[in-house]
Image: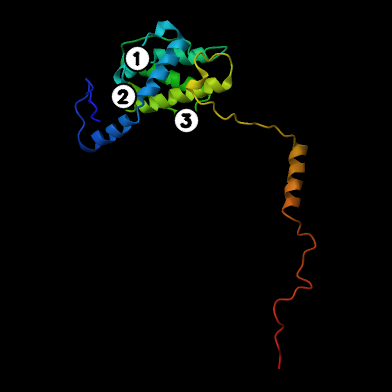
């Protein structure tokens, strides 16, 4: 299946290795997931965020200034919003700053570092599949937390396995250690007395 390659306006063509690497990264971008993410973000944030043009470049352009992402993360926090100021700006560094505010807030929300995209992945379009991965992880967390802030179809994202944190008292911990000791068997009073190994040596 031939895919039409769309050159980015601000960048010349890539050659050789970097082109192959970029093609591999691009192939991980999922158009079906794009539809789900767009639908979710639109419902989650309301009509104010608009909708992107179909396709990867439209998706990137929609999220690039960080404002839609900031609206999204704010909508998931039930109380105080993590991003106090959401402001669209034509200036590159302001847009990148807005994206990094989103990333910090997403981490606070519980998205793991391994699921995080880097600012350049989105801003320069280096790895939009990574952006999808971060947003999917965010969606999964929102569905799992059940804080009443998730606004979308719960089947769009996998529920994450909840970490089962248990707090044990010191007494319980000590009792647990004794149990483990007994399970491993006791070596109290063990000696080699009465044990014979093979035939005794004959002395002639």
Residue hosting label 3 = 113
Q: Is residue 145 left or right of residue 103?
A: right
Could you say whether the residue bearing mark 3 is in a helix, strand or loop?
helix
Label 3: how many residues lie within 10 Å, few (<14), some (14-19) or many (20+)?
Answer: few
Compared across the picture, whether 52 is left or right of 150 comes to: left
The C terminus: image quadrant:
bottom right
The colour scheme is: rainbow
Residue drawn where x is 73% and y is 51% of the image: 183
- Mark 1 and mark 3 in contact? Answer it, CB < 8 Å: no
Quarter holding residue 117:
top left
How far apart marks 1 and 2 lie (CA) works out to 12 Å
167 left or right, relative to 68? right
Q: Earlier in the sequence, mark 1 or mark 2?
A: 1
Residue in view at x 42 percent, y 14 percent: 39
From this viewpoint, which residue is outermost toward the bottom? 204
Label 3 – label 2 distance at C-alpha: 19 Å
Tell me, yes or no, whether the two marked residues, 1 and 2, touch with CB atoms within 8 Å.
no
- Labelled disc at residue 62: 1
Q: Position of residue 108 (x, y in %)?
A: 52, 22
**Mark seen at residue 125:** 2
Front residue of 95 and 138 = 138
Disc 1 versus disc 3: distance between alpha carbons?
Answer: 23 Å
Q: Position of residue 3 (x, y in %)?
A: 24, 27
């Amino acid at each position: 299946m031939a895919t039409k390659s769309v050159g980015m306006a601000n960048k010349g063509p890539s050659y050789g290795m970097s082109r192959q690497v970029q093609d591999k990264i691009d192939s991980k971008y999922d158009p079906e997931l794009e539809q789900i993410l767009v639908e979710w973000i639109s419902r989650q944030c309301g009509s104010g965020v608009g909708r992107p043009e179909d396709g990867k470049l439209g998706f990137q352009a929609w999220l690039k200034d960080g404002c839609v992402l900031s609206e999204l993360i704010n909508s998931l926090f039930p109380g105080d919003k993590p991003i106090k100021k959401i402001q669209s700006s034509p200036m590159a560094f302001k847009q990148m700053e807005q994206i990094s505010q989103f990333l910090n807030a997403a981490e606070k929300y519980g998205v793991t570092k391994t699921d995080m995209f880097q600012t350049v992945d989105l801003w320069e379009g280096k790895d939009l599949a990574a952006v999808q991965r971060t947003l999917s992880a965010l969606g999964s967390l929102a569905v799992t937390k059940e804080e009443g802030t998730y606004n979308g179809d719960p089947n769009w994202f996998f529920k994450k396995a909840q970490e089962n944190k248990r707090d044990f008292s010191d007494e319980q911990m000590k009792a647990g250690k004794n149990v483990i000791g007994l399970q491993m068997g006791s070596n109290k009073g063990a000696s080699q007395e009465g044990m014979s190994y093979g035939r005794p040596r004959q002395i002639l």
